[in-house]
Image (cartoon, rainbow, N blue to C red):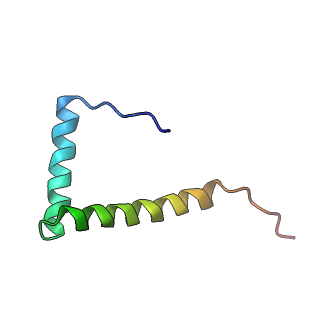
Amino acid sequence: MDPIVMLDSRQEAALQAIADKFIAQHRGDPVKAFKEMIVLNGHLQERLDALTAPRRATR
């Protein structure tokens, strides 16, 4: 399991502002915004996995 990230009050306020904007982009629907975030994180994880995968020799 990944460790839990601890935020100070300034970081928490900044994160809340970003979350509010992201939800607003999804017409105020937090579930729709959450689903979009899951999809975006999945795409990013696939790209990271591709970058860290052992490269095969192309000969």
53 and 34: which is toward the camera: 34
Image point 23% across, 28% down: which residue? 8
Can you tell which quarter of the image residue 58 is in?
bottom right
Q: Is residue 8 left or right of residue 40?
A: left
- Using residue 24 as the reference point, say whether residue 31 is left or right of it: right
Residue 39 in the image: state x and y as whole percent. Answer: 39, 66
The quadrant of the rendering that contains the C terminus is bottom right
Q: How many marks?
A: 0
Residue 50, x across and y down, in percent: 61, 61
Q: Residue at x 23, y 64 (%)?
A: 31
Q: Is residue 46 above or below residue 27?
A: above
User: For the point 46% across and 65% down, which residue is it?
Assistant: 43
The percent position of residue 3, horizontal first and vertical second, equals: 44, 33
Q: Residue at x 46, y 62 (%)?
A: 42
Query: How far from the left and from the top, in percent, is residue 54?
Result: 73, 56
Q: Along the horizontal axis of the image, is 22 left or right of 58? A: left
Is residue 46 shown left or right of residue 56? left
